[in-house]
Amino acid sequence: MTAPDALPLAPDFPAGLDWFNTGRPLALADLRGKFVLLHFWRSGCTSAPHDLAVLAKLARRFHEELVVIGAHAGRFDREREPAEVRAAVLRHAIEHPVVNDARHALLCAYAARACPALALIDPAGALLGVLPGEIDPDELAPMLERRIHERARRAELDYAPLELASESAHAPRCALKHPSKLCVASETTLFVADTGHHRVLQLEYEHRERRARIVRAFGGVESGWHDALGAAALFRSPRGLARRGRTLYVADSGNHALRAIDLELGDVRTVAGTGARSAHRPRVAAAPDATDLSAPSAVCVAGRNVFVAMAGSREVWALEDERALHRVAGNGRGALIDGFAPQASFGAPSDLAGDGQRLYVVDAEASAIRVIELAGRPAVRTLVGRGMDAWGDQDGIGDDARLQHPMGIAFDGSLLVADTYNHRVKRMDPSTREVLTLAGTGERGHVDGPADAARFAHPEGVAVRNQLVFVADTDNHALRVIDLRRHAVHTIEVV
C-alpha cells in the first residue's frame, strides 16, 4: 500500500449516513492523531468473516493508535437497509464503528471499485492508499506496526481512547444466539448450530408443549478450536449439520474445518481441515486433516460421501469414507454458470440437500437454486436464478421466480428454502421449478400465527419432518416451526 509524496486528504464521511457502535456520526477530524483503517465490506460476502476477524485482532493489538471503521456498501436491496446493517453488526460481533454506505458514496469517493477493500488514513488525515480484495494479515500487520512506530517517534499520535457505544449492549440475552442450521434426527431429537455461542446443541423437542429442552451442548460459549468431550470442545461459528448413524458432522466455518461428533460418546474430533483458510483446491492424495478448507457452510451425507459446501472457495467438495477429499463442482470463480460440474461456477454455495441421485445447492450470492446431477458425468444446472445481478421476491416458475440471497435448503420430495434476505420460507417443486411462498410477509419481525401473516428475521436454516418445517430464525435468536397441516407458525421455547 503506497501513495505519492504529496498525499491527498482522505474524503470525509458524508452527512446523513447511519452509524452503528458510535452513538453519533463521526468525522475524520474526530480521529486526528490515529491511524484509520476504513474497511469497505458487505454482510453477505463470503470473505467478510475472515476479514472482520483479522480487523478485530488488529484493533485489539493497536487499540491506542488505530481506529477501524467499517463502511458497509451493500449489493442487495435488503443489505442497504439500516435495520439490516445493524443486525449484521450484531451477527458478526463487530465492535468497531460501522457506517452504512447504502448509496456507495464513500466507495466511489475512495475509488474502491468493489467490496472488499481497505483504505489506510494517516494521523494527519491523509490517504495513504487503497488496497482492494481480501485482507492479508501477514502483509497488513507488519506494515501497520512500522508506520505506527515511525509516527510514535515523531510524537504525532494521540493515545486518548475514542468513546464508542456498542450495539451489543442492547442485544437481547437468549438461550440461542444467531442459530444458523438444523438437523432433525427424530420426532423428538433436534440438533442446532448455535452459531453465535460457538456450540452445537442437542434438543429434546415436545411439539404439543412447543418447547425444546437442551440435552447436551458440544462446545462452549467461547470460540476456539479444540477436540474434546462435549462442552470441553471448542468451535468457531459452526454452521451446517448432517447425521449418519452415531456421527454428527459439523461445518465448523470459522475454523475452516469439518468436525465430527460421536453421539454415543460425546467426543468431538476434527475430520478435515488444518485451521488455515485454503487458497487452493484439495491436493491430490493429501490427508483430509492436512488439507486447508475455506469457510465450509454446509454438509450433506449421501452414501459413502459427506458433501461439503465450501462457501469461501465457491465450490462443493466430497469427503469419501473420511479418507479422501475431492472437488465435485465449482471452478472457484464467482458466477452463475452451468455445465460440467468441475467447470461450473457458483456465487456462494450456502446449504445442501440430497435425494440420493442429486445434490441441491442453495447459491446465496447468485440468489439461485442449483442442482448437481451426481450420476454419470456430473453436471450442474440452475433451477431458479438468472444471474449474479438478478434477485427479488417473486413466486413463479423457473426464470420468473425471484429469491434474494437464500441461505438454507431442505428436501422432503419438494425443496424448502430459507429465502434469507426476503425474511420468508418458500417451497419449490424441483420437477416443475415452481416456487411458492410458504410463510412470512417479507418484512423483518417476530410474529407467530397464520403462515401468511408470520414474520421472520434473516432465517438461515430449514429442516423438515412429518409435515413440520423447522426454521433457524437467525436474527430473532429463535427456532420456529411451520405446521404444514395448520398453515401456522409458532416459536419453540428453548430451555
Image: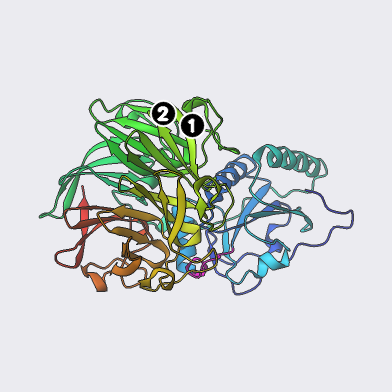
Q: Is residue 109 magenta?
A: no
- Above/below status of 309 relative to 464: above
Question: What is the number of the mark on residue 495?
Answer: none
Q: Nearer the viewer, residue 249 or 302?
A: 302
- Say what amino acid the circle numbered 1 marks: Gly
Q: Is residue 77 magenta?
A: yes
Question: Is residue 412 visible to the viewer in this orientation of the structure?
Answer: yes
Q: Which residue is mark 2?
A: 270
* Mark 2 → mark 1, Cα distance in angstroms: 7 Å
- Above/below status of 460 relative to 183: below
Q: Which residue is mark 1?
A: 273
Residue 411, given in percent of the width and then of the height, sits at: 29, 53
Q: Seen in the image, is 6 located left or right of residue 98?
A: right
Q: Are marks 2 and 1 in contact (CB under 8 Å)?
A: yes
Q: Nearer the viewer, residue 11 or 425?
A: 425
Q: Residue at x 76, y 53 (%)?
A: 122
Q: Which residues are magenta?
A: 73-81
Residue 348, given in percent of the width and then of the height, sits at: 50, 53
